[in-house]
Amino acid sequence: MHLRIKTSLLLLPLLLAACSTYRSGYVAVSGGGRLYYEEKGEGEPLLLLHGHSLDRRMWDKQFTPFARHYRTIRLDFRGYGRSSDQDEQLPMTHVDDVITLMDSLRIDQAHVVGLSMGAFTAGDMLAMYPGRMKSCVLASGSIRRGSPPPSEPMDSAERARRDVEIAALIEKGVDVMKHEWLEQLISSGGSQRERMRKPLWRMISDWTAWQPLHKEVRLFYGREAWDSLCSRRPSVPVLMLTGETEHKNYRPRELDYLPNGRHLILPDCGHMMNMEQPDSFNRAVLQFIGQTDNHQ
């Protein structure tokens, strides 16, 4: 009993320090937009980038644990959570919004952790702005190498196809689509997948579903980012994480162009690995980032 009390007292200053440095606010981005962010902790900056249909809350199991070691920042991408809406007529990319956030918070370099859509964004940063990264974790995603870049806007044929897709979605019903999407995320998981259902549904049900109901501008650098990665071969330390139950016998092509890249398969989890197996995810990420800190 005495040992347990002593251990708790030793940990208390760390917990209080992490909690006492909580901050939140908005940062102005292009076109009059605003990005909402929250930060906690001190030390090297660490950015958490969320997935599609979700928001900063998907990092609830990481925010405080990571803040015990790093200045941890989580944000809502434009069009999600508390950030401002997207606009069909306003050119933008998620990575350029993140760079604006970093500049506004006076962050020159950061450790960047992205999952799914967040990994697409982190992949864009790795390819287009590698000098802004101290390390990069790409979970359940990477560069969208098959996607057209912002320099190739939507033509009339693609716009017509999107009109058909949007009409079909409206006919089916947005709520039906949301439930199907939830089940898709859950079904990729392993033995602990049901623990994600309620927190995932809270975010998906709050989501406006603007993106599938509109013609989005090119939000990712896509093929342009892939070409840049192949030519630059950035030296940034990169950890690519794959959930065992989502992909088997998978080796990311990006590793051929990342001299300091490595790949790790997390057991018994799928696409939303950070929510399904938070302890394993946190341990892998913190160990990786800690190793990069020790070698700088």
Image: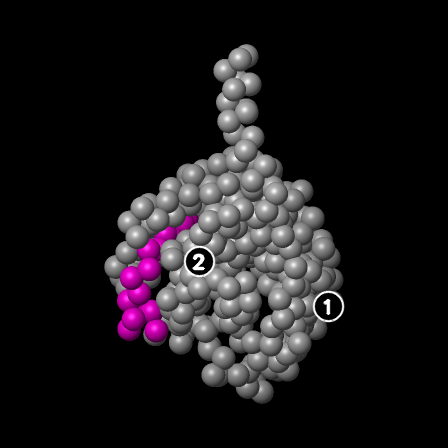
Q: Residue at x 31, y 65 (%)?
A: 234
Q: Would you say 84 lies left or right of 145 here? A: right
Q: Which mark is residue 110?
A: 2
Residue type pointed to by label 2: Ala
Q: Residue at x 51, y 27 (%)?
A: 10
Place residue 141 in its image quadrant. bottom left
As displayed, is residue 24 above or below residue 155?
Answer: above
Q: Position of residue 30 (x, y in %)?
A: 60, 76
Regarding residue 53, the answer to whether it shows in the image is no
Element type at mark 2: strand
Residue type pointed to by label 1: Ile
Q: Residue at x 67, y 48 (%)?
A: 201
Q: Which of the image's four quarters has the N terminus?
A: top right
Nearer to us of marks 2 and 1 is 2
Element type at mark 1: helix
Regarding residue 198, the answer to whether it shows in the image is yes
Query: Magenta span covers which residues?
Result: 228-242
Kindly report the distance in space between the C-alpha atoms of the residues bearing marks 2 and 1.
40 Å
Q: Position of residue 57 (x, y in %)?
A: 62, 50
- The reply to whether the magenta stretch includes residue 229 is yes
Dot 1 crowding, Cα within 10 Å, few <14, some 14–19, many 20+: some
**N-terminal of the two: label 2 or label 1?**
2
Q: Residue furthest top?
A: 1
**Along the viewing direction, whichever of 217 and 178 lies nearer the viewer:** 217
As displayed, is residue 160 above or below residue 260?
Answer: below
Q: Which mark is residue 179?
A: none
The answer to the question of whether label 2 and label 1 lie on touching residues, with beta carbons closer than 8 A, is no
Q: Which mark is residue 170?
A: 1
